[in-house]
Amino acid sequence: MLGEPHPPPTDGAGTTAAWRWHHAGFAVDDLDAAIAFHRASFGFEVAFEVRGLTDLIRQVTGVPGLSVDIAQLADPNGDTVFELLCFHDVPADVDPALPVRPGMAHAAFSVEDLDAALAAVVAEGGSLLGSITTFAEGRGVYCRTGVGTVVELLEQPRPRGQGA
């Protein structure tokens, strides 16, 4: 629970106990053009794509009326996931920290205990943006860090044989 003390993590990296970098996400103004550019320039291929995502993006960002077209691209040279997000109906008064305008970005990290990781971000001066949201791959949340960046924490079990 947010605000409750948690014991220091014993596994993973840093106070959040993140066990891997999950993806980098960039807001774009044209999803099809961005996909084509990253395919031609860097060899990325679409691994996941959905158009018109509403309820989940509204919940995780806390922005009513927002929708997004999203594509996750696979790196031909490794395990990096590159996420492209084309937001629609962004209110003029949206929190400027939210990475919903073209050119803005966020980094996402996999953690085993979302509540403990979120508490660690808050303890370091960060804050919750939107609310904890349940996605197909696990619970997730956007946070503003104490230094002004935005990170997404995704609760996912560590695969067997990987670390702790």
Image (spheres, rainbow, N blue to C red):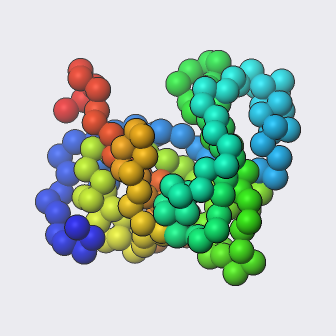
Task: Please tell me in which quadrant of the rendered image residue 94 appears.
Answer: bottom right
Q: Measured along the vertical axis of the image, is residue 105 above or below residue 32?
A: below
Is residue 150 something one can see in this rendering?
no
Q: What residue appears at the point 65 percent right and 64 percent down from the top-left corner?
A: 66
Q: Measured along the vertical axis of the image, is residue 21 above or below residue 28?
A: above
Q: What residue appears at the point 42 percent right and 66 percent down from the top-left corner?
A: 131
How many numbered markers are drawn? Answer: 0
Whole-percent x and y of residue 23? Answer: 54, 40
Whole-percent x and y of residue 104? Answer: 70, 58
Is residue 128 something one can see in this rendering?
yes
Whole-percent x and y of residue 140? Answer: 41, 52
Left or right of residue 12: residue 86: right
Viewer-closest of 1 and 108? 1
Check the image and name the residue furthest to the bottom: 93
Q: Measured along the vertical axis of the image, is residue 94 above or below residue 9?
A: below
Viewer-closest of 87 and 97? 87
Task: Please tell me in which quadrant of the rendered image residue 73 appears.
Answer: top right
Viewer-closest of 100 and 108? 100
Left or right of residue 133: residue 63: right
Left or right of residue 60: residue 76: right
In which quadrant is the C terminus drawn? top left
Left or right of residue 135: residue 115: left
Whole-percent x and y of residue 110? Answer: 39, 42
Task: Please tell me in which quadrant of the rendered image residue 137 appears.
Answer: top left
Q: What residue appears at the point 73 percent right and 51 percent down from the top-left corner?
A: 86
Q: What residue appears at the point 17 percent right and 46 percent down from the top-left corner?
A: 10
Q: Measured along the vertical axis of the image, is residue 125 above or below residue 75?
A: below
In which quadrant is the N terminus drawn? bottom left
